Amino acid sequence: MNKEFLGLTKVWEIKVKKVQSVARKRPPSLFATMSVAHVDDDDDEDGGGAASGRHVEKNFPNGDVYMGQWADDLPHGIGKYVWADGCMYAGRWCRGRTTGKGKFSWPSGAVYDGHFKNNYMDGEGTYTGSSDDTYSGGWLFDTRHGSGVRRYDNGDHYEGLWRRNSPDGKGRYQWSNGNQYIGQWRLGKMHGTGTMIWADGNQYDGNWADGLPCGNGKFRWADGSFYVGVWSEDPKDRSGTYYPPNGSAGGGAAATGNLDWDPQDAYSASTIDFRISPGEKIPILPSQKMFSWSCKNGARSTRESVDATLTESLGSESDSVGSCSEFDGATASEELSDAAPGYKRPVMIIKPAKRQGQTITRGHKHYDLMLNLQLGIRHAVGRPGPTVSINAKPSVFDPNDKVWTRFPTEGSKHTPPHPSCEFKWKDYCPSLFRTLRRLFKVDPADYMMSICGSDALRELSSPGKSGSFFYLTSDDRYMIKTMRKSEVKVLKRMLPAYYNHVRQYEHTLVTKFYGLHCVKVSGPAQKKVRFVIMGNLFCTEYATHRRFDLKGSSLGRLTVKPESEIDSTTTLKDLDLNFIFRLQKSWFQEFRRQVDHDCEFLEKERIMDYSLLVGVHFREISSSGEPLIFNTRSMGNRNNPNETMDDGRDPKWPASIHLGSSIPARAELAVRKNNGETQLVGTPTGDYYNVVLVFGIIDILQDYDISKKLEHAYKSFQHDPASISAVDPRQYSKRFRDFIFKVFTEDT
């Protein structure tokens, strides 16, 4: 048996320095000839360092062999276990469990090289199958989970998010024939919004369900023509409009009946391309392998002992959950670190994210307004217009340009018949907003499909403080806000400077505006409703668990709500903030520069009362719903989410993320020593959450007019002038930046 074992050990040729130094001090033995592959000498996880324990060679009655470090009658440190059936593990152990970096190989030739935890593949690792089916990325309880890349044995390729061994979340799948899908997945099937691109140049953008196009969608041909409508396997449920290559609608909604082809045929003929490779199955999972000793401390020997934990963990929205022997997770019941002695951690329970707003259906008081808005947008976007370069100077555009269109109920030469009342539609500065949409890389058909598709808009539960109403598109990409006449005047006045600013700074944090319109209802009332279309900051692949509206003032900046009533839709304010957000160096430098540029622009335009809206996603949540805390003493044993490569980029995050959108960070818990308004930023505690942040500057249409000057004068008699939101734009900009640069800091 020893001869067979020596033959196996020759496979592992990378030597561990600490093992060698210890071995040289001991009498020669079989272990002195052993080397362990892919073990990091600097990792000393849970006391399992290379220098701990004594070296042993154990031959078990069932034919298994263990050779390595041993302590308290269990493997502890670095060692190798060879099963009689040919499976082998070499790497780190902790009290009889495979924990840390290691390599597991199967007799078939398959190999897993990466992190283990409690006998499971858990953490970052690479599995290479016997047929060259490879996966590299995150694992959780022996399942592919988190961000990862898989190359299938048939030549297909998937890169994106995983859950329970299946693509789930945002990802890209490329078939060996050149076709590819980019979008949302659920349980291994295309589900949600996504784009299918065929090798011949055809493309489908829209909604998917259970692996097939379903709902609003756009099919674009290589010649530039496209069809926008509702897609379904049932021909009775489909409807839409065909747009020829020149960009004008082919005769309205009735055009589909005049075509010599059926768009549904194009969809049906291509569904054969949607099949996903099953891939190679792992022969036997490492956690299913039995060891020839009785594990102490409740070490698991079968998968059944964690079935409930696995179900709870993978059912949450975090990247990984549960306790880990590589670091110390903490809950709210424990005391804070020495940075803030005597304080208790706040109890914070993350509730499942819920969809905002009430769907506007027939009978809703704003149903006709929604129809008018959708009809107007479809007409405005589909109407041919002059092509203007995105590099054009603002002088090319007339800020007073506007186009009126009448929409009679029976229809006209340019408008379709509709069930709503007669109304007039006004487009403000159509050429400028068309150019802005191009600058923001918004596809006209996608834009029209989001706002004017068959799915209704959603109205947010309550209007804003200004009395404006807010609406969300069904795909959450766009937000529509009703506006006062004064706000329209401010936006029109600042449009040339706004255009210059967003053209100069690609990743500006100020709100993105896509269109400015007005609906005037005919009849005695002659009611006018003005509205602007903006980007929705929270339309990301990560659920928003907490949101904050930050101004840098204290008067009235507290949300009086108990923790039990706070959920993902609650907007918290300055005095509710109990975090300091620590960004990786390159992100923080870019963030600071951009905030300075944006505030200078707003100051020149005499704008004040704007906010930094921040969305927080907690990456690790316990099964009880509490975000996991990691203190400074345990962070050294954990991969820093802000660790960077030489060029300043984060190696674990896609290069497509940009400032303000899905930024990885650490949120340090901060506490205030009093309940007053004198301490805007709390005292740091040394306890951290791993988070993903989205942020942007909103409410940028309030100028310092006479009403704000009077508000400032009146409130100054009753309160500290520095605590009032309504102050001079120059003073507001300075106070805003001073506060934001205390809340956002560089992660050192």
Image: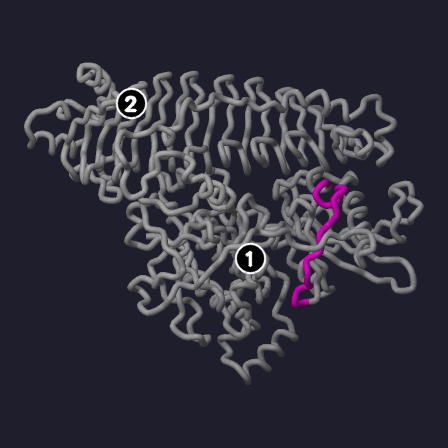
Where residue 83 is drawn, which disc sits there? 2
Inspect the magenta stretch and tell me whether residue 595 lies in it. no
Measured Cα–Cα span from mark 1 to mark 2 = 59 Å
Residue at the front extreme? 61
Q: Is residue 430 above or below residue 346?
A: above
Which comes sooner in the sequence, label 1 or label 2? Answer: 2
Q: Name the image quarter holding the N terminus.
A: top left
**Residue 63 x/y as whole percent:** 25, 20
Q: Which of the two residues, 487 or 171, is positioned nearer the viewer here?
A: 171
Inspect the magenta stretch and tell me whether residue 462 lies in it. yes
Dot 2 amino acid type = Trp
Q: Is residue 430 above or below residue 551?
A: above
Which residue: 68% across, 51% down? 472
User: Which image quadrant is residue 454 in?
Assistant: top right
Q: Is residue 570 visible?
A: yes
User: Which image quadrant is residue 465 in?
Assistant: bottom right
Left or right, residue 698 beside residue 493:
left
| Disc 1 element | strand
Where residue 697 is drawn, which disc sits there? 1
Residue at the right extreme? 410
**Residue 107 x/y as whole percent:** 34, 17
Which residue: 69% across, 31% down? 213
Q: Is residue 489 visible?
A: no
Where residue 51 is drawn, which disc sits there? none
What secondary structure is the magenta-colored segment mainly? loop
Q: Which residues are magenta?
A: 449-466
Q: Residues within 10 Å of mark 1 (few under 14, many from 20)?
A: many
Dot 1 amino acid type = Ile
Give the colouring mode of the picture.
one colour
